[in-house]
Amino acid sequence: MDTEAVIFDLDGVLLHTDRFHYLAWKQLSDEKGIYFDEEINQRLRGVSREQSLEIILERYGGPALTPEEKKQMTDKKNEIYRSFLGQMTPADVADDVRTTLLALRKADFRLAVGSSSKNTRFILDKTDLAGYFDAVSDGTMIRRTKPDPEVFLLAAELLAIRPEKCLVVEDAAAGIEAGKRAGMKTAAFGDAAKLRIADHDLNRFSDLLPIVGNYTGVNL
């Protein structure tokens, strides 16, 4: 079996919380008088909370901020974001996602989440997704964010599967690069699929099944 495990990014792949990130950063930016729009928001995809703030502060014209003030800002953003996440339910996960994950589990593939988000476990619990996965590698466990491969290499380690036996599913260019740097196969979903930079491009989440089936000879 060439592929033994599938590692999924969270936001934009398993579910979509982009609107919550945008609204939280927008509220924080407005309070600080910093210009923020959808184009800037796109630059924040797949990067850490701290790196996102530095991108937003490129438009900041006030006095220099101390590390403590920046920490207060990222904490405030997360409070706002989590208030939005608190509204999520299992209905926010597409049926296509659940049926695909269930098919992979029935075929004995090991499944993991590899996300830079520090809210990963909270989101998985709110949406009733946690039980599908054998391991979770997230922003609370890593020091370097994508395109560094750390989050995916840790996921493979937690699964006890060699990186070359793993397939990464991502919706961001940085995530595809991280998967490749980890020595893993890659499948692009959403925006990343338009870039044609992965080993495979998915139009629908369930397109993953024949791809994995081709690698393994398993009829999914």
Image: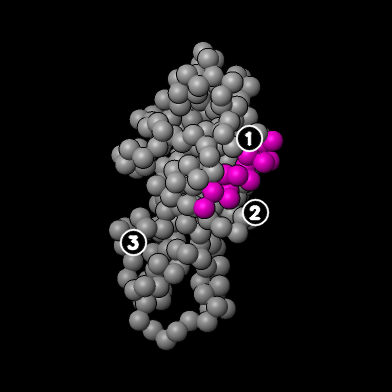
Q: State the CA–CA distance, disc 2 to disc 3.
A: 27 Å
Mark 2, residue position: 141
Point out the frontmost of discs 2 and 3. Answer: 2
Secondary structure, magenta segment, majority class? helix
Which mark sits nearer the N-terminus, 1 or 2? Answer: 2
Q: Which mark is drawn over residue 10?
A: none
Query: In x, y percent, where is residue 4?
Result: 60, 27
- In the rendered structure, the answer to whether residue 108 lies left or right of residue 14 reads right
The kind of residue tagged 2 is Met
Quadrant of the rendered image containing residue 109: top right
Q: Is residue 220 magenta?
A: no
Mark 1, residue position: 162
The residue at the point 58 percent across, 41 percent down is 113
Q: Which residue is at the front of the view, 163 or 14?
A: 163
Q: State the CA–CA distance, disc 1 to disc 2.
A: 19 Å
Which mark sits nearer the N-terminus, 1 or 3? Answer: 3
The region drawn magenta spans: 148-160
